[in-house]
Image: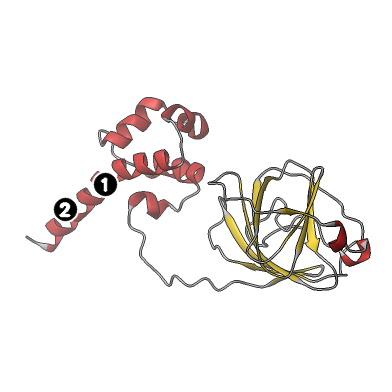
């Protein structure tokens, strides 16, 4: 087999694998053909033919699909090369909070390691709301979480999850910093909640429980969680 024939065979193999890959990615996201059609402007019949291999994939068709699924184009085509898996976070400092982005891809679920220092933000909690869903996991220190009518404290190894459309606020307890992981996304598998009600004896003076509202906010992909 000549080099040209080998290359042509490789291209045919790649194109033949696109359809099943499109179907798998769509199903993993719980999307229907009708829903994907509405989001991309591509007809249901065309999408169905793409997934079954009856229609050759083209940039005109794959670009809007990749945009809706929030995946790189080469992931749809299957040509993505494995690179350095290490994430080198760019540290962000915002009003007493130091954030380390742990994910590189924009959109979808985003992860941050957050170190929140006490006393650097407003003394009075200011619950806020925005679209999305958030998970918190405390690594060290204690984190006060106000969610609607609930006021709880989380210690190391404890986690919480909540709909960010509910008024919420969190910050360090007392005069010690708190270190935690924050996962923010529009949807995803829920984690187990382990949050004990705040004990009266452990309540701190408001000035010692200061913090900034929500370390995720509607985040910009390049800058991490918003204030």
Tell me which corner region of the image, top left, top right, bottom left or bottom right, holds residue 148. Answer: top right
* Residue at position x 71%, y 45% in the image: 164
Q: In this rendering, is residue 202 above or below 186?
A: below
Residue 214 position, x and y percent, is 75, 55
* Residue at position x 67%, y 73% in the image: 91
- According to the image, label 2 marks what residue? 9
Q: Is residue 16 left or right of residue 215?
A: left
Image quadrant containing the C terminus: bottom right
Q: In this rendering, is residue 20 above or below 5?
A: above
Residue 10 position, x and y percent, is 20, 55
Image quadrant containing the N terminus: bottom left
* Closer to the camera in the image, 94 or 12: 94
Q: Residues within 10 Å of mark 2 (few under 14, many from 20)?
A: few
Q: Is residue 187 left or right of residue 96?
A: left
- According to the image, label 1 marks what residue? 17
Q: Secondary structure at mark 2?
A: helix
Closer to the camera: disc 2 or disc 1? 1
Residue 180 position, x and y percent, is 67, 65
Q: Residues within 10 Å of mark 1 (few under 14, many from 20)?
A: some
């Amino acid at each position: 087999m000549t080099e040209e024939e080998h290359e042509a065979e490789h291209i045919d193999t790649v194109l033949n694998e696109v359809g099943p890959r499109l179907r798998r990615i769509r199903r993993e996201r719980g999307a229907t053909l009708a829903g994907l059609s509405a989001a991309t402007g591509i007809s249901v019949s065309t999408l169905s033919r793409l997934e079954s291999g009856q229609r050759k994939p083209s940039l005109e068709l794959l670009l809007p699909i990749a945009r809706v699924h929030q995946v790189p184009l080469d992931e749809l085509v299957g040509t993505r090369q494995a690179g350095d898996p290490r994430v080198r976070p760019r540290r962000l400092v915002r009003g007493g909070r130091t954030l380390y982005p742990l994910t590189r891809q924009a959109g979808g679920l985003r992860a941050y390691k957050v170190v929140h220092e006490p006393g650097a933000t407003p003394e009075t909690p200011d619950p806020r709301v925005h679209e999305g869903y958030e998970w918190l996991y405390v690594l060290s220190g204690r984190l006060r979480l106000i969610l609607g009518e609930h006021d709880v404290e989380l210690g190391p190894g404890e986690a919480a999850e909540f709909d960010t459309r509910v008024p919420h606020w969190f910050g360090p307890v007392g005069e010690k910093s708190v270190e935690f992981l924050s996962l923010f996304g529009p949807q995803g598998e829920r984690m187990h909640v382990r949050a004990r009600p705040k004990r009266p004896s452990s309540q701190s003076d408001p000035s010692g429980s200061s913090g900034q509202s929500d370390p995720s906010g509607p985040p910009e992909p390049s800058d991490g969680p918003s204030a």
